[in-house]
Amino acid sequence: MPSLPSITIATRESRLALWQAEHVKALLAQRGHAVTLLGMTTRGDQILDRTLSKVGGKGLFVKELEAALEEGRADIAVHSLKDVPMELPAGFDLACVMQREDPRDAWVSPQHAGLAELPPGAVIGTSSLRRTVLLRSLLSNLKRTDIRIEPLRGNLDTRLRKLDEGQYAGIVLAAAGLKRLGLAARIRHIFGTEEMLPAAGQGALGIETRAGRPDLAEALAPLADQTTWLAVAAERAVSRAMGGSCSMPLAAHATLDGRRLHLRAAWGEPEGEARLVRADGVAEVEVEQLAAAEALGLRVAADLRAGGAH
């Protein structure tokens, strides 16, 4: 029997990123691979005084990891898929998408059960333009024009610390990260997708490799989840068609009912009127190929633009 390739995983050093890398390491080790981790600090981890949309986008979390792949210091990089740019650089592949955790957003607050219970003039923390426009819409529906939404940067533990220090009345985080780190008890409310539509790829893990590594593609194939991959392919196609950066106040979420793919998207202005442009599409045939999922994403993106999104 040929020996299985040893694999080095490039990972950020936040607690959540290390959990994700250790999770993949354990799955690969179960299949007989020798696996090591290469911990790294990225530009996205270092720049905490400005919003991502103003300093280069979520690609700041992956560039150093890609450099490690390109230089041969690592074989794969494990990412939260919502942090992965919609267009990978030439020479890199998204080689695996794993089964999704809860894709929804979570409300975290020591004292307030939800938006309706916030005191006058309360401050909500989020660094996401998507969450900002969706929160503005929800607050508008509640006629809570007194609530402020302020930037919140840092890894998950840093954000929770800032909340506990009293800098915010509540913050919005991905439910998946809290659950993966055993912090589900911090969640006061999980927003249904009809309230707050998730980001493209939220809750899913993606594994990136250099192109032309069939040995790694074979090793990662057992870790892939086709249902998740089809859904996120549709979601990422919407984002790619609309511009594909974290400066885009865009939500996209797909689900499969059998093999029928249902995709919803929403777009809003971060300033001015708290109005959302929404689009909704269902694949006319059963979706089994990524190209068909992406075609649905392009159709929903066209509907967003027709509704006034830009």
Image (cartoon, rainbow, N blue to C red):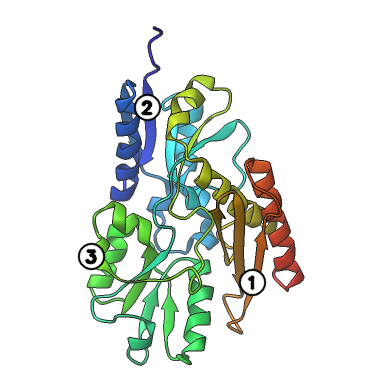
Residue closest to the eye, 54 or 7: 7
Tell me how far mark 3 sits from mark 2, CA to CA: 33 Å
Classed neighbour count for the residue bearing mark 2: other residues with Cα under 10 Å, few (<14), some (14–19), many (≥20) = some
Earlier-in-chain disc, 1 versus 3 = 3
Checking the image for residue 8, the label placed there is 2
- Mark 3 residue element: helix
Please provide percent x and percent y for residue 3.
38, 11
The three-letter amino acid code for the residue at tag 1 is Arg
The residue at the point 48 percent across, 77 percent down is 135
- Mark 1 residue element: strand
The residue at the point 66 percent across, 68 percent down is 279
Q: Which residue is mark 1?
A: 278
Q: Is residue 58 above or below residue 222?
A: below
Q: Quadrant of the N terminus?
A: top left
Tell me how far mark 2 sits from mark 1, CA to CA: 42 Å
Please provide percent x and percent y for residue 183.
24, 59
